[in-house]
Amino acid sequence: MTDAVVRDLQTLLDVGAMGDLPDGQLLGRFVERREGAVFEVIIRRHGPMVWGVCRRMLRDHHDAEDAFQATFLVLARRSASILPREKLGNWLYGVAYRTARKARL
């Protein structure tokens, strides 16, 4: 197997195993290792909620997409400051709400 195939298989296994981790452990793992696979699990888990907040607040699809992406950019930059880590979903909701509200102005 090539290195790329092995890496892809490992990512699939990691994502599957991480899908069962509680938010606090998942966020802790992202803060410590900055793994893209962990970030992907967070987006898969909380993305629909963030998208819903952005779409409800913003009528324009493109504005909602921008707010959605901005929310996860804030997560990537400020992940270490989220406490308690178990409240990741609440934190993301708040960031999505504030980001979409600013976009409406």
Image (spheres, helix red, strand yellow):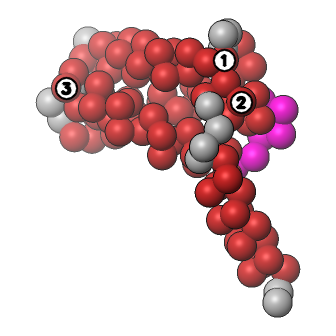
Dot 3 alpha-carbon crowd within 10 angstroms: few under 14, some 14 to 19, many 20 or more: few
Main SS, magenta residues = helix
Report the Cα–Cα distance between label 3 and label 2. 30 Å
Report the Cα–Cα distance between label 2 and label 1. 8 Å
Dot 2 alpha-carbon crowd within 10 angstroms: few under 14, some 14 to 19, many 20 or more: some
Single out the mark in the foreground, 3 or 2: 2
Taking the image as shown, residue 100 lies to the left or right of residue 28, namely left
Pointer 3 or 2: first along the chain = 2
Pointer 1 or 3: first along the chain = 3
In this figure, which residue is indicated by the disc labeled 1?
85
Residue 24 coordinates in the image, percent (x, y) = 67, 24
Say if 47 sits above or below 102 in the image. below
Report the Cα–Cα distance between label 1 and label 3. 26 Å
User: Given contact means CB atoms under 8 Å apart, are the residues at marks 2 and 1 in contact?
Assistant: yes
Amino acid at circle 1? Arg
Q: Residue lying farthest front?
A: 20
Q: What residue lies at 27% left-to-right and 32% top-to-bottom? A: 52
In this figure, which residue is indicated by the disc labeled 3?
56
Residue 74 coordinates in the image, percent (x, y) = 57, 25
Tell me the magenta residue range. 31-36
Amino acid at circle 3? Arg
Q: Please state which of residues 24 and 51 is positioned toward the viewer in this rendering.
A: 24
Taking the image as shown, residue 68 lies to the left or right of residue 19, namely left
Q: Please state which of residues 16 and 80 is positioned toward the viewer in this rendering.
A: 16
> Looking at the image, can residue 66 be seen?
no
- Verify whether residue 34 appears in magenta: yes
Q: Residue lying farthest bottom?
A: 1
Quadrant in the picture for residue 93: top left
What secondary structure is found at the residue carrying circle 1? helix
Taking the image as shown, residue 5 lies to the left or right of residue 94, namely right
In this figure, which residue is indicated by the disc labeled 2?
25
